[in-house]
Image (tube, coloured by chain):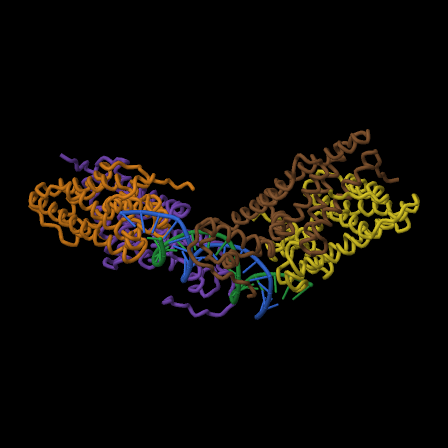
Chain colours: A orange, B purple, C yellow, D brown, E blue, F green
Amino acid sequence: MGAVKSARTGRRMPRAVRERQMLDAAVRIFARRGYRATSMEEIAERAGVSKPLVYLYLNSKEELFTACIRREAEALLAAVQSAVDPALPADRQLWAGLTAFFAHTARHPDGWSVLHRQARTHGEPFAGEVAALRDTIVAYVTGLVRAAAHEAGAARQEPELAERDVAGVAQVLVGAAESLAAWMTETGRVSEREAAATLMNVAWVGLGPLLRGERWAPR
Amino acid sequence: MGAVKSARTGRRMPRAVRERQMLDAAVRIFARRGYRATSMEEIAERAGVSKPLVYLYLNSKEELFTACIRREAEALLAAVQSAVDPALPADRQLWAGLTAFFAHTARHPDGWSVLHRQARTHGEPFAGEVAALRDTIVAYVTGLVRAAAHEAGAARQEPELAERDVAGVAQVLVGAAESLAAWMTETGRVSEREAAATLMNVAWVGLGPLLRGERWAPR
Amino acid sequence: MGAVKSARTGRRMPRAVRERQMLDAAVRIFARRGYRATSMEEIAERAGVSKPLVYLYLNSKEELFTACIRREAEALLAAVQSAVDPALPADRQLWAGLTAFFAHTARHPDGWSVLHRQARTHGEPFAGEVAALRDTIVAYVTGLVRAAAHEAGAARQEPELAERDVAGVAQVLVGAAESLAAWMTETGRVSEREAAATLMNVAWVGLGPLLRGERWAPR
Amino acid sequence: MGAVKSARTGRRMPRAVRERQMLDAAVRIFARRGYRATSMEEIAERAGVSKPLVYLYLNSKEELFTACIRREAEALLAAVQSAVDPALPADRQLWAGLTAFFAHTARHPDGWSVLHRQARTHGEPFAGEVAALRDTIVAYVTGLVRAAAHEAGAARQEPELAERDVAGVAQVLVGAAESLAAWMTETGRVSEREAAATLMNVAWVGLGPLLRGERWAPR
DNA sequence: GATGAATGAGGGTTCATTCAT
DNA sequence: AATGAATGAACCCTCATTCAT
């Protein structure tokens, strides 16, 4: 009825192209409806092919969803990594990475929704796929925070930050970044650079007192 | 299949009791399977009643899910609010609130999953219910951060924090807290107090340099 | 939701009164929704009693519907019969009967709908109940037509009408009357007297040529 | 139960054929059970297909019922129209039309039941479909009666019949015809030609006195 | 390389009916 | 005299998936 039909653009396309069309359609629909509410019928229709062809290429709904998750995870990781020059100082790397992250999620809201919302809400095996991605990112950010702390500390002759605190800052950074990205794509109220700047101010500027050993403790 | 059956504990209970049982069952199953993948049958079974009774009391799957969201939202808000003494200084309030938040989500992981994951993933009208809760919390946290900045600034004769930064810190706090809570309940790798302490260190301790006007800027 | 609830007018009423309320409610709802689409719930609600009470008094949906049919059939028959004075000439009796019939169906459209539409569309045992009523009426009308023909024929020294033609005229009369009654209650386009007059003109006035032996035959 | 199963005659048939089978089955069952009491399951079974296929081709119970009504209405209209030669005099046309009508309803009792009983009993949108058919037929019959009166009147130098009476006769004719058809198919007590002849005698032969201005009036 | 035809299985919802009080 | 609590059974509809061509 109201479904937008992609005009079936010429039959007989090479497999790689067809597959891409199917994944594009799938990501879009999974992102907007959720895994269970998405029907293979609708994906096939939007991809401009028949249902059996979707099965021929992607085997099952579960494998199709997994393929979507993998493709989007790789794309996101590639976007962030290619934006970061490992030769730069840690804070510049962090800035570049955050900017690339927010830019990518803003440009691919459906992909981000699949990763951040849909995959995590529908249990195994999908959640595991995303967990792996997240672990990679957390590890990378942890390295950056450690290096940043090291540089800053070295400059000011201060003791390095304890691993626990490094990990804590990294977790907060990643968690807040995810949250901001979702908020950005859903409400459009913040720009990519604003989001990145907010995080840099908290993470980087806030590192100073932590490096000097300040801690908050209940009393 | 493998579903655990609650031994039907005696027929003929007053409506209020039955309704509670149904909501308990529903929250648990919605949290684990997601809205669409949850069947009314399974909820009824777990609640120890027949499906028609669930419909008699809760009308429809959608209303049932909404009732779950509302109950869990109210419970979470009540837990946090009753933990906070408005007479205390802002940092103590923040600590108390965060601790209560993490304690509640740790004790009610299914409720938290319904609020944080499921409700937000399945569109309107569910997302709206949770958005209202989140707005309440963000407003409250913003107030605390502003007050905290005010106290700290006043003590040190420093200019107060700009509203933009207050809002940024609040957003990061709430986003990071949500993210940590989910991570906590999903992986069990951090304790409630650790989570709260990490956030206090970043938010509270890191407030210092921000108050002194330090900002990170790319160049 | 939108259902009109009769304010439960005082508990503890004599059985006969309660039963009447239930039948009233049932006729009304059966007439408007049809047998299958009517729920015992709605009847009970409209009657201002609980469902078990409906069962206590009327045993089952089927018996309840049958009771409605019988009550309405008896009422219709009584209305027609009490309007007819057997001492009058046949044409006056026919006129009185038709007028009473149209008046009754106009005043009790739900009852007429139950008899004419609902009961006949839902198979046995309901159709049989109405068939009995119809047979009674057809027999009565046949008698009137025969008598009318006799009077007219006797006056003009003409041969009486053959039984086949008498029966034919009676069938047409009854069929047309039913049809007009339904049309009247559904569209409201004709008055009771107009309907009766139309039928008298066809049946009575048209009797003349038939009595003189005129017939239409294909050639 | 007692359901007759059509031996599944070979799988894989072209859509048009299957659709016809489904409509055949549906008309039969709707006619006998009524709309609400008919289950899609039973229709599918009788059509020799699975339930989903019925939905694939006919979308919903409501659309299926509507499709039945339309098909039967068109078939009935076509049968009557093709039997009538507009070049013939009005009485011959009427006779041909009535004969065709009774013949068609006798040969397709289920179709007639769907049109006359079921569709009208189950409210909109079904009743509207049949009302359109009836209007067409009433208009056609009105034309015939008018023409017949004109011919007859012209021959005898008499004044034409008033429009009100023409309409009255047409309504009575159509109503009586419907009623006789239902009675015929339900009881089998009259033949098609007898039914048509009865109506011709009343309508055609009875037209004479009406043309001469005779009217019945109460007094 | 691609599809029209077809289905098993399951989910949301409703309803007539009963039991215990 | 009357009801709140409860359910077995069915029904409409959808969907992931396959077969035959």
Residue drawn where x is 13% and y is 47% of the image: A144
Q: Position of residue A43 (x, y in %)?
A: 34, 47
A31 is higher (above) or lower (below) than A63 = above
* Quadrant hosting residue A192: top left
Q: Nearer the viewer, residue A41 or A14?
A: A14
Q: Is residue D119 left or right of residue B202?
A: right
Q: Is residue A148 left or right of residue B195?
A: left
Q: Position of residue B208 (x, y in %)?
A: 20, 42
Q: Is residue D144 left or right of residue B12?
A: right
Give the position of the C terminus of chain C as an image quadrant: top right
Q: Position of residue D161 (x, y in %)?
A: 78, 32
Q: What residue occupies the far front of the structure in this picture? A: C219
- Report if residue B90 is visible in the image: no
Q: Nearer the viewer, residue C172 or B11?
A: C172
Picture mark count: 0
Q: Nearer the viewer, residue D93 or E18?
A: D93
C60 is higher (above) or lower (below) than B210 = below
Q: Nearer the viewer, residue C32 or C202?
A: C202
* Quadrant hosting residue A125: bottom left
- Report if residue A49 is visible in the image: yes
Q: Position of residue A139 (x, y in %)?
A: 16, 51
